[in-house]
């Protein structure tokens, strides 16, 4: 059986983290904090080091396809894992309008359209990914990796060609909205840094997980950090105050640095990249929703299509409907994609809080990985607070998940059997990794059992990774 190499693992991590946000986040961050938003980018890159190290340590210690849901369940039980599932599932329709509008902004920029063009493009993108998944079709992981690589190449070209036009006085005034705005900008940037946990679900596929996963993560950290910092810094130095007033900063950089019809090419790439990324999120979230229904964490109506090889059309229909309603709300109120980004970032941040908290409980006391987990937990908890009033949405989803889980368990005693910690998977019952003590198993369930929510969250994370 073929095994994943370090370069392949690094490519998956880069593809998971370097998503659609980079084509618009420099503008959103600049709107909030002005040129001082560069400090938010630096802070998020610095935070990525202990955060990525934490999930890499969890991946090597628990080389299991369950990913973050496995860690949360082992540390805190089934209800916390249900919260993770709900946060992932409902974050997709919440973030869909923003992701689709990012592509729409590049189409409008290329062809001289207005907000109507942005919204129409966004509606077509949402409809496309919904219909594609209804047919059971998926854009291949290889194609999505190619698109992510193309985006990385465009970022390098935009940065290198536009830098000669940089002016230091474009950074003045540096903090027009105050220093606290930097924290708010960092909370928004979570959108662009979500994904460090995704490759951990593939840890068992490495030839030597204990060695290869940290190396792949390290390579991804360097590449993502350089690309993000390069495009954000260049945007501020070249565009100045215009960075926060445009919805397509990358197109402006390419137009300044390269010229010609580059904006049309950039719009096409942004459109394809957005469709590919949203297709993966819709595919994974639809399967997650069906599994949550089958597992009792959502109404049983959602469970249709939860069996392997089936299409979860009911769950997918809910995602498409909620996404359309969210886009209609954006169109009716006249607000931009920023609200959608902030609400979705809050959901991702809570998932990281639970994942880091699980790492603090599961990783060996006194180890460097546990210390990284402590730093990560403090940092992402601060980010959750910096989300401000937008965290109320995330808390509402979490409370609803807990109340629903409690109601279902009180009414269905058989669901209590799913609450204990799962038994170790085959990869966990094999010989322990060098220098890593085997995980403690506290389950009395049947051999080979893993709750369905863990398996399907892993599917979602794998989809995001590719």
Image (spheres, rainbow, N blue to C red):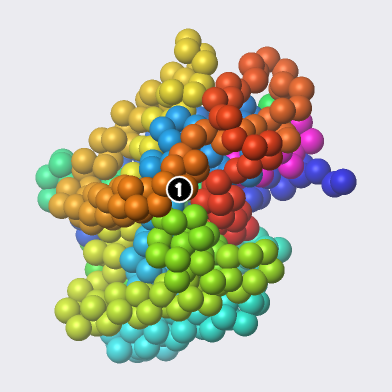
Specify start and end residues of the magenta stretch as a single range.
198-208
Determine the residue positioned at 50% across, 43% down: 418
Q: Which of the 4 image quadrants contains residue 76?
A: top left
Q: Position of residue 338 (x, y in %)?
A: 26, 64
- From this view, report whether residue 168 is shown above or below residue 93: above
Q: Residue 49: where, in percent of width, then height?
A: 47, 32
The residue pinned by badge 1 equals 415
- In the image, is 408 to the left or to the right of 203? left
Whole-percent x, y for residue 15 in the image:
58, 55
Residue depicted at x 23% and y 78%: 329
| Quarter of image, res 404 | bottom left
Q: Which residue is the extreme one toward the top?
A: 366
Observer able to see residue 59: no
> Which residue is the extreme one toward the right?
1
Residue closer to the observer: 185 or 377: 377
| Left or right position of 240 against 122 | left
- In the picture, the quarter occupied by the C terminus is bottom right
Say which residue appears at 42% left-offset and 88% top-offset. Answer: 111
* Res 142 seen here: yes
**Helix, strand or loop at mark 1:** helix
Q: Is residue 146 magenta?
A: no
Relative to residue 174, is residue 68 drawn left or right?
A: right
- Camera-nearest residue between 305 and 361: 305
């Amino acid at each position: 059986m073929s095994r994943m190499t370090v370069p392949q693992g690094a490519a998956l991590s880069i593809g998971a983290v370097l998503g659609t946000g980079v084509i618009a986040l420099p503008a959103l961050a600049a709107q909030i904090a002005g040129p001082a938003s560069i400090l938010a980018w630096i802070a998020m890159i610095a935070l990525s080091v202990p955060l990525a190290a934490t999930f890499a340590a969890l991946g090597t210690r628990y080389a299991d396809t369950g990913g973050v849901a496995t860690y949360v369940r082992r540390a805190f039980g089934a209800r916390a894992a249900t919260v993770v599932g709900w946060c992932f599932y409902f974050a997709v329709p919440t973030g869909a309008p923003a992701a689709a509008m990012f592509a729409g902004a590049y189409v409008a920029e290329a062809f001289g359209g207005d907000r109507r063009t942005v919204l129409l493009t966004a509606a077509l993108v949402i409809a496309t990914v919904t219909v594609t998944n209804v047919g059971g079709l998926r854009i291949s992981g290889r194609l999505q990796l190619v698109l992510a690589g193309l985006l990385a190449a465009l970022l390098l070209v935009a940065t290198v060609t536009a830098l000669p036009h940089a002016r230091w006085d474009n950074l003045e005034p540096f903090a027009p909205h105050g220093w606290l705005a930097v924290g708010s900008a960092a909370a928004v940037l979570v959108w662009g840094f979500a994904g460090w946990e995704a490759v951990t679900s593939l840890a068992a596929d490495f030839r030597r997980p204990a060695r290869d996963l940290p190396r792949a993560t390290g390579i991804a950290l360097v590449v993502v950090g350089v690309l993000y910092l390069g495009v954000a810094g260049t945007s501020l130095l070249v565009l100045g105050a215009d960075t926060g007033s445009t919805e397509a900063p990358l197109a402006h950089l390419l137009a300044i640095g390269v010229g010609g019809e580059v904006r049309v090419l950039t719009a096409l790439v942004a459109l394809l990249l957005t469709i590919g990324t949203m297709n993966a999120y819709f595919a994974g979230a639809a399967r997650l929703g069906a599994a949550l229904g089958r597992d009792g964490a959502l109404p049983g109506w959602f469970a249709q299509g939860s069996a392997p090889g089936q299409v979860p059309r009911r769950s997918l229909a809910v995602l498409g409907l909620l996404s359309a309603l969210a886009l209609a709300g954006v169109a009716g109120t006249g607000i931009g994609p920023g609200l959608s980004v902030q609400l979705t970032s809050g959901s991702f941040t809570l998932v990281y809080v639970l994942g880091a908290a699980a790492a603090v409980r599961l990783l060996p006391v006194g180890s460097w990985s546990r210390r990284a987990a402590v730093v990560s937990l403090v940092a992402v908890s601060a980010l959750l607070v910096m989300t401000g009033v937008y965290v109320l949405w995330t808390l509402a989803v979490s409370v609803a998940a807990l109340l629903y889980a409690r109601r279902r368990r009180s009414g269905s005693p058989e669901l209590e059997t799913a609450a204990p910690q799962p038994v170790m998977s085959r990869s966990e019952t094999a010989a322990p990794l060098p220098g890593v003590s085997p995980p403690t198993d506290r389950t009395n369930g049947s051999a080979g059992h893993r709750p369905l929510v863990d398996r399907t969250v892993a599917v979602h994370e794998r989809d995001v990774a590719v």
